Image (cartoon, rainbow, N blue to C red):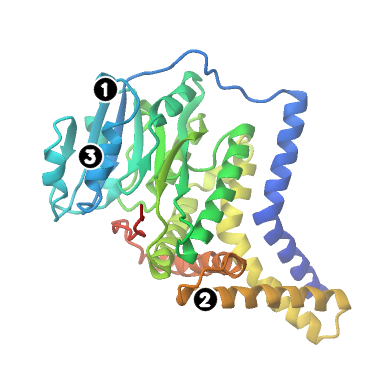
Amino acid sequence: MTLISVIFWCSLFLVCYSYIGYGILLYIVIRLRRYFVGPRQTDERTPFTPEVTLMVAAYNEEAFIREKIANTLALNYPAEKVQIIFVTDGSTDNTNNIIRSYPRITLLYEPERNGKTMAVNRAMKYVKTPFVVFSDANTLLNKDVLPCLMRHFSDEQTGAVAGEKKIIVAKQAEAEGAGEGMYWKYESLLKKWDAELYSVMGAAGELFAIRTALYEDIPADTILDDFMISFGINKKGYKVAYAPDAYAQETPSASLEDEYKRKVRISAGGFQSMSRLLDLLNIFRYPKITWQYVSHRVFRWTVAPLCLLLALLTNVILCASGAPAVYWLILFLQVAFYGMALVGYMLARRQVKSKVFYIPFYFVFMNVAVYQGFGRFVRKKQSAVWDRSQRQLTTG
């Protein structure tokens, strides 16, 4: 029972560290850094408005593309300094005809559908500016997004800038919107602290910017292109800054099934990315980012899901073997938590909105997706070709 007890407590500790402990420790380190070194400062006194390319990869987005284009053309930045590229490889609907009616936009299209990674690799050869901003076709940007991103590049050590992702959750939104929105609020807080310490641990594809000169073509089968691009820049010795005042807004997934499909794909991509970034585990080679990378990404995608299962199984074994009362208390809390997650799932299936039950469900939901994502990664069943995500419609 001694070994079982050790596994139990280690599993419990690693789960708590992955989701809560890292954030607490990171905040303490930042507070100490502020005290001894002072906070990081971004020079906002002198406007930095270099030439920039806004690149959007789209696939069969005819229902939303006009709104995306209108949003893009209305951005607050000198028009003569912005190159706009839409790459729509494989699209079979009216997306291309709509884009062609806007002369400011450069349309890149090939009939063969090879996935977003290949489309972006190809489109980057047409970029003529020193900076590129990537944005998803199903998101809307705030008007000042370009100056908010560009000002961080006044620091020569900044190789990329991650924007903010916001989930639009109306008062009458579906339950999954509350869970997804809560998750991204927490992730945004961690990004803020990661960036203050040194660098954001992976930019989200909805909105991020890079120095064009640092871009390297990534393998065609890459699932998470944004993740690999941003960490590739880290490996070159540059940091990824964070611009919370530059944000992309999108609605939640249209259904639990769509959100689960997206989470499984992200999980499979996470395992693929980690297998290609093994050298980042070497703290002697990358002393500035290894701790952040392992704690925020590797543990979240590998250790935590496994330890959740181990913590429950070993807890049951210990209680069945006559363990002290503290083990029974922890088992009760675990069972209660998973019970709330089950209730959250059943309510969500009936379109009943309850944050109290949905948040535990969303937590379990994400970790179950990791297991299936790992299975797809091992079997090489996850295609890099992306499907257009179904999103909820906004009202008003």
Amino acid under disc 2: Leu
Q: What secondary structure is found at the residue carrying circle 1?
A: helix
Check disc 3 and report the residue beneath it: 86
* Front position in the image: 331 or 376: 331
Residue 109 in view: no
Cα–Cα span, label 2 and label 3: 40 Å
Check disc 1 and report the residue beneath it: 79
Q: What secondary structure is found at the residue carrying circle 3?
A: strand
The residue shown at (32%, 39%) is: 217
Q: What secondary structure is found at the residue carrying circle 2?
A: helix
Pinpoint residue 350: horizontal percent, then vertical percent: 46, 77
Q: Residue furthest right?
A: 324
* Front position in the image: 69 or 88: 69
| 2 or 1: tag closer to the N-terminus | 1
| 2 or 3: tag closer to the N-terminus | 3
Pinpoint residue 2: horizontal percent, then vertical percent: 83, 74
In this image, 225 relative to 244: left or right?
left
Quarter residue 55 falls in:
top left
Quadrant assignment for the N terminus: bottom right
Amino acid under disc 3: Phe
Quarter residue 147 falls in:
top left
Check disc 2 and report the residue beneath it: 347
Amino acid under disc 1: Ala
